[in-house]
Structure formats: structure tokens, C-alpha cells
Amino acid sequence: MFHIILFFFFGAICMAGAINLLVQSHPINSALSLITVMAALAGEYLLLGAEFVAAVQVIVYAGAVMVLFVITIMLLNAGKEEHTKGSRVAILIGVPGVLIAAVLVTWTLVSRGQTGSVAIGALPGSPQEIARLLFHEFLLPFEVTSVLILIAIMGAVVLASRPEAIAHHPAKADQPDSAPSKRKDAPQLVASGVGSGKER
Amino acid sequence: MDTIPVSYYLVLSGLLFTCGVLGFLIKRNIITIFMSIELMLNGVNLAFVAFAAQWHSLSGQIFVFFVMVVAAAEATVGLAIIIAVYRTRQTLNVDQVNLLKL
């Protein structure tokens, strides 16, 4: 009984956040409701016994990824969205189709789904068990993801840097000629490389 | 018995995925569309964890971990692309972003 109350509590928060994401017209409101969805999903993971996944959900999704989203929204000063003719066609055709699909999936799962049932903590999803799997059977994929993240970091830096910053980069190649002489006199000037680049 | 059917979790997962698809269709702000994709990924993750609990196998949770890693990398690169798009066009409306190259 307690389990089902908690499930519906977190599920209701999830759905309210997801619908609020669709209804809000300002992106910052959508981002905050998405944080609500992710935090409530962490509660659902805990109910399923997945402690590690719940912790990672809060730290990585609700924490890191959503901070990235909010910072981007603030950086670009995103305002309210405006709808055009093409978006009305998408709403007219898309919304009924998606709703029909949702009703079909729900009906199929509820009426003839041959799934079992779960209790709280039925599966030990503790960090020890996850780590044992991750560092023995899934060691190679785990290491490959580190390469993936490294590539993503470099790609983000290259994509988000200003084009003129890349264009000016070859000009910095002749800077080391003058830099060592400066470094003896005033180290703090050379340390702020961005400031000296703007002066030139 | 303090158990609940796995299909409840799957229904919630399907509804979250549907909300994501709906947002992808009706939203015009490129950042909000990106957030809808994250919502879809979250719905799929819930299905993975529910099936892992049903079949008493931790592989589903490991897969969720990898999905999260890839989603984080995807968010990083995607937001960098959004910043680059905004620099060249001064808009976030996807209806005005119809050319790859200006």
C-alpha cells in the first residue's frame, strides 16, 4: 500500500512537470519543470531499488545537465517562443497522433500486459553491485565512454568558441618572441592573455 | 503484499516519452525542443530500470548509466551547436533556421 502511494505521488509530480514543460512558453520555466521531472524520477528509481541510478540521476541529470541548460538559456537571453503557420500544422496533425499512440500503449500494457510485479528493494542496485559489473564485464564500454566525453568536451569548446577567436589564433604564433621579455618585467600582464590580445 | 505491477512503471514511462514527442512537435524554441529530447531519454531510462527490476538483472541499470553518459555528452555538444546557431542567426526559433549555411 505504501509502495503504491509513493509510486502515484512521484508519478503525479513527473506528469505535472512534463505537462508544464509543454504548456509554458518561456524556456526557463520549461527547464525548471524538467528539473522537477528528473528529481521525481529519481524517487521512482529508488522505489525500484536502483539506488545508484537514482543518485546519478540527481547528480548528472538534475544537477549537471540542467545547469548547462539554464546557463545556456540565460546566456542567449531566450525569450518567449512565437508560433508560425508551420507549427500549427504540426500541432493539428501531431497532437492527435501522439495521443492515440499513448492511449494504445497504455491500454495494451494495462489490459493484456503479462508483466510481473516488483517490491521495494527487490533487486540490490547498490553501488557495490553496479561497480562490480561496471569494472569487470563492462570495462571496455566504460573506458570508451571516457573517450566519448573527452571528444564531447573538445567539440563543445570548438563549436562554442567565437569564429574570430579561431581566426586570430595563428597571429598568436609570433607572440612567444615578445612574451619571454615581458615575463621578466611584469608576470601579471602575461598571465592575462585575453587582456593583452584585446589591446593588440 | 507490498508489490506493484511493473506495467504501472511502463505506463508512466510511455506517458513521459509521449510528452517528450509532443514537446518535440509543438515547441518552436530550439532549447525547449532539446529539453523534450531529454524528457524522452528519461522515459526510456525508467522503462530500462523497471525491466531490470522485473527480471532481477542489473544489466538494465548499467545500460541506464551509459545512456546518462551519452546524454550528458549529447547535451554538451548540442548546447554548443545552439550557441553557434544563435551567433550566426540571432534567433532560437526553429522555423527561421531552415538553411544549413547562410
Image: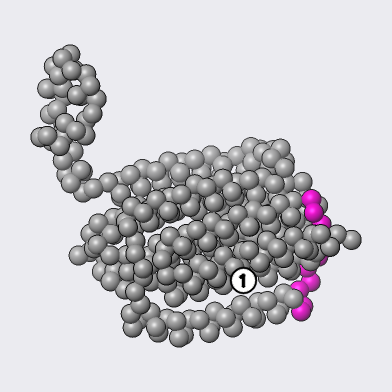
Name the image colouring. Answer: one colour
Identify the residue at image location x=61%, y=71%.
Answer: B15
Chain under numbered label 1: B
Instruction: Using residue A94 as the reference point, say whether residue A73 is left or right of it.
Output: left
Residue B6, above or below A198: below
Q: Nearer the viewer, residue B20 or B52?
A: B20
Residue ID at (64%, 53%): A42
Residue sitting at x 85%, y 59%: B2
Quadrant, the C terminus of chain A: top left
- Tally of numbered tags: 1
| Percent coordinates x, y for residue A110 in the rendering | 74, 76
In the structure shown, which secondary structural element does the residue marked by tag 1 occupy? helix
Task: Identify the image quadrant of residue A131.
Answer: top right
**Mark 1: which amino acid?**
Leu
Judge the density around disc 1: few (<14), some (14-19), many (≥20) Cα neighbours within 10 Å: many
On screen, residue A199 versus residue B15, left or right, reads left
Whether residue A120 is visible, yes or no, is yes
Q: Is residue A30 magenta?
A: no
Instruction: Determine which quarter of the picture holds residue B9.
Output: bottom right
A144 or A171: nearer the eye? A171
Residue A118 belongs to the span the image colors magenta:
yes
Q: Which residues are magenta?
A: A111-121
Residue that lies at the very extreme toward the left in this rendered image: A200
Q: Is residue B64 left or right of residue A21?
A: right
Task: Classify residue B10 by image quadrant.
Answer: bottom right
Place of residue B44 in the rendered image (x, y in percent of width and height, measured from the top left) = 60, 62
Q: What is the quadrant of the N terminus of chain A in the image?
A: bottom right
Identity of the residue furthest to the right in this view: B1
Q: Is residue B38 left or right of residue B46?
A: left
The residue that mark 1 highlights is B15
Query: Residue A59, how many percent across, how many down?
Result: 56, 45
